[in-house]
Amino acid sequence: MKIKLWILSIASALLLCGGFVLKNIWDYHSERNQPTNFIVSIKLPHIIAMSVEGSYAIYWGDLEYFKKHGTTEQTLIGSLHLQGDRYSFLPEKCFINLALSECIKKSSDPREKLLIDRYFTNRFLFLTKPQGKYSIQYQEPTFHGYTTLENVEEAETLLRINFDPENTDINSLTPDRVFLIRNMKDAKKLRFHSTISEVEFWSITKHW
């Protein structure tokens, strides 16, 4: 009887010990097999079709003032948002509900007269018509919608953007509604240019 009890005791001890070892081995492998969450950062290329959309900051500044006062400070007029085939212009601060002349009367900015003159003589369509449609025409065959900006040289003209797409007579489109967009590769920006020259006194850019 004593021998049977002794054998049972040894067997029980072996089972307990074996169970402990097995549990540790199982736990060890379970921990090793647990799925791990990795955060992978994928740097996607900036293609023209997607990069051209978004918000462009619109600044105004007069070269005469720059020369006289030795500054490059410009006035933020608002932002131009492009999405799909539609645009919207959001004026900045007091430009929202007041006429420009009234806005400037409330300002102590010494550029008042210059701002009034230049603003009204260089008024773009999207400033007078804050919502509407636009169309783009890539500079084919060099560039197309899937061209990556990283592979485009500095100051290359990517496309032509028309804020009066219903007007099919290209010769009747005035510089206030048709622009070129160039790639500023070094600054990683897209910049509006006039179809005939630089956008004088204006800066219309966005980061890509």
Image (tube, rainbow, N blue to C red):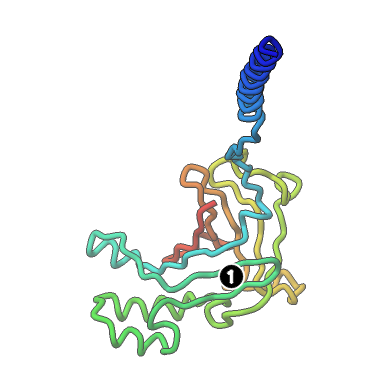
**Which residue is pictured at 29% across the width and 87% down the height?**
105
Q: Of residues 66 and 136, which is closer to you in this image? A: 136
Q: Position of residue 181 (x, y in %)?
A: 59, 57
Q: Which residue is mark 1?
A: 175
Give amino acid for label 1.
Answer: Pro
**Which residue is pictured at 54% across the width and 70% down the height?**
80
Q: Position of residue 54 (x, y in %)?
A: 58, 62
* Res 100 → quadrant: bottom left
Q: Is residue 151 left or right of residue 93?
A: right
**Which residue is pictured at 28% across the width and 86% down the height?**
106
**SS category of the residue bearing label 1:** loop
Relative to 127, is 204 above or below?
A: above
Q: Position of residue 198 (x, y in %)?
A: 50, 59
**Which residue is pictured at 44% across the width and 88% down the height?**
97
Q: Of residues 41 and 56, which is closer to you in this image? A: 41
Total of numbered circles in the picture? Answer: 1
